[in-house]
Image: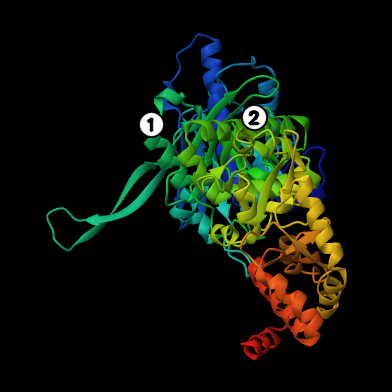
Amino acid sequence: MAKKQFKAESKKLMDMMINSIYTHKDIFLRELISNASDALDKRYYHAMSKGESGIARDEYKIRIDIDKESRTLTVSDNGCGMTAEELENNLGTIAKSGSLDFKSGVEKGSEVEIIGQFGVGFYSAFMVSERVCVLSKAQDSDKAYLWESSGVDGYTVKEAEKNEAGTVITLYIKANTENENYDKYLEQYTIQEIVSKYSDYIRYPIMLNMERTELKEGTEDEYETVIEPTQLNSMVPLWRKNKNEITAEEYAEFYKSKFYDYDEPLKTVHSKTEGQVSYDALLFIPKHPPFDYYTKDFKKGLQLYTNGVVIMDKCEELLPDYFSFVKGLVDSADLTLNISRETLQHDHLLKVIAKNLEKKIKSELEKMLKSDRENYEKFFSAFGVQLKYGLYADYGVNKDTLKDLLLFTSSFEKKPVTLKEYVSRMTEEQKTIYYACGETVDKIELLPQTDAVKAKGFEVLYLTDDVDEFALKMLFEYEGKSFTNICAGNLDLDSESEKEELKKENEDNAELLSFLKESLDGAVSAVRFTNKLKNHPVCLTSEGMMSLEMEKVLSNMPGGEGAKATVVLEINREHKIADTLKSLYTEDKDKASKYAKILYAQSCLIAGKSIDNPTEYCDLVCELM
């Protein structure tokens, strides 16, 4: 029989279909199964529209058979089948989709869910096959036909024998090459894995004869190989069931098996949305971050399905970076896919879904914060840093979304509080939100400035993450209240009379303070007396936009070596060290200079700042002991 050439397509186009469109060879099985599902849907739809019972719904099946000896993989269905003309039109013309034509005639809202759109999925079979045979019999025909092709050299169609309606696609698997292992497509575990990954929620049973070894009956040590039909797919997606029909245990088991976590999720969000774009979403907030979460190797994203067929394992566009900890999936039939159905066309519907999901996640977190504080604090302990980075990133464009989700440990009972909770406790005389930075809460509590602020009856937020102060700087204010670092030079705790008295103290000792500054050889921008330190002798404060903590963070980053805060050494005017310095300045300036270096080193240690010359510091202390 003479071969026919593919209609309207050149060998170059055919080669592109086989070798360029699909990035993963495993996709071929997803495409063939999807086509089989479409054929079953068409048969069911025709039966319903004509008022015929046809075969029972539970008799519709997709079957996979492996024959290692002949190197064939067969995918068959008892769907609508194809006539000779349909074989010519659908398989002889690349990019002619019978499913798409059928779908356009199906009423919207019908129970039928047609997957195929482009008419190219079938040709992915040639990625793994040297020859493909399609035996098909239309449901209302008494004749069957065999379509056969080895690829670009054309195809043949001839009459054949087949008893039942449906289609049988036989792939003659290629031999292994140096770079490709095609034998794996003749292994049941590979087929099982591909079906589980891409076609688990096709709504018809996908059957495969699975081999297993079991103890031979009546023996104690003899084993035999048993072959039995096994369903590979779970069929009904969990997310399409009614929420009231699903137990917490079912959600947890689905999450653990699907997203490879050993622990159940902290929060499950199951929603169905209809409107401009319709979709089902099943989202999970884990109890802990994955091991690579804060590395460049981590890839965010939700699984994306269309009609139960997985299209993308991680669709990054569906989640903003600050909610990248969310795991889960979205299933929508409304999205526009590219020709290979491996990626999305970037249309506005995808953005609509992403925006809706962002609002939903935020809403669920707010509910947890309000009604399940213990679990929210666990969540924030695991992922709070990500929210803070999200507030700081992109010049604070997301600050209004995230500001009320933040928690900071507070001097009020040393518990995590929200900014709203802090502001609600502020007295009328307090005009600003006070905070302090440090490695740990305990170290911040030891700061001299902490004592001073708490003594005035003000609450202090303890910032222990590197990003914390940057986030607050980007937030700028909260409910009209500015933020003040208690280690900054503009800490305003004094009355007007106290300010005047301190100003006179510094003016009267201007020469001493200037001498102490010169003794420190540029390490500080100024030395001055202060009255805010209670019993502590000295402290470091910063002036300008960059704080001491910001300097530490930036200096540890690549290229941040030049980051320097403007530092002031403050000496407690009520401490006896102040009197000692005044006496030494007139009696022993050399000793006064050494005292200045010791006091500066001590203030650095208190502030968590490294000492430039620890050897000199130790020598000076020993000399003066």
Quadrant position of the C terminus in the picture: bottom right
Q: Does residue 229 appear to the left or right of 325 in the view shown?
A: left
Residue 84 numbered tag: 2
The answer to whether residue 413 is seen in the rendering is yes
Residue 251, horizontal then vertical, whole percent: 43, 36
- The residue lying toward the viewer, choosing from 464 and 606, is 606
Measured along the vertical axis of the image, is residue 596 above or below residue 26? Answer: below
Numbered disc total: 2
Give the residue pinned by disc 1: 247
Measured along the vertical axis of the image, is residue 2 above or below residue 219? Answer: above
Q: Amino acid at mark 2?
A: Ala
Residue 171, horizontal then vertical, whole percent: 56, 49
User: Which sits earlier in the primary sequence, circle 2 or circle 1?
Assistant: 2
- The residue lying toward the viewer, choosing from 219 and 378, is 378
Q: Residue furthest left?
A: 218
Q: Does residue 379 appear to the left or right of 596 in the view shown?
A: left
> Which secondary structure, mark 2?
helix
The span from disc 2 to disc 1 (Cα, nearest Å) is 49 Å
Q: Amino acid at mark 1?
A: Thr
Residue 420, horizontal then vertical, whole percent: 63, 35
Query: Quadrant of residue 617 in the image?
Result: bottom right
Name the residue rendered at 78%, 86% in the picture: 588
> Which secondary structure, mark 1?
loop
Name the residue rendered at 56%, 11% in the picture: 49
Residue 110 numbered tag: none
The answer to whether residue 144 is seen in the rendering is no
Quadrant position of the N terminus in the picture: top right
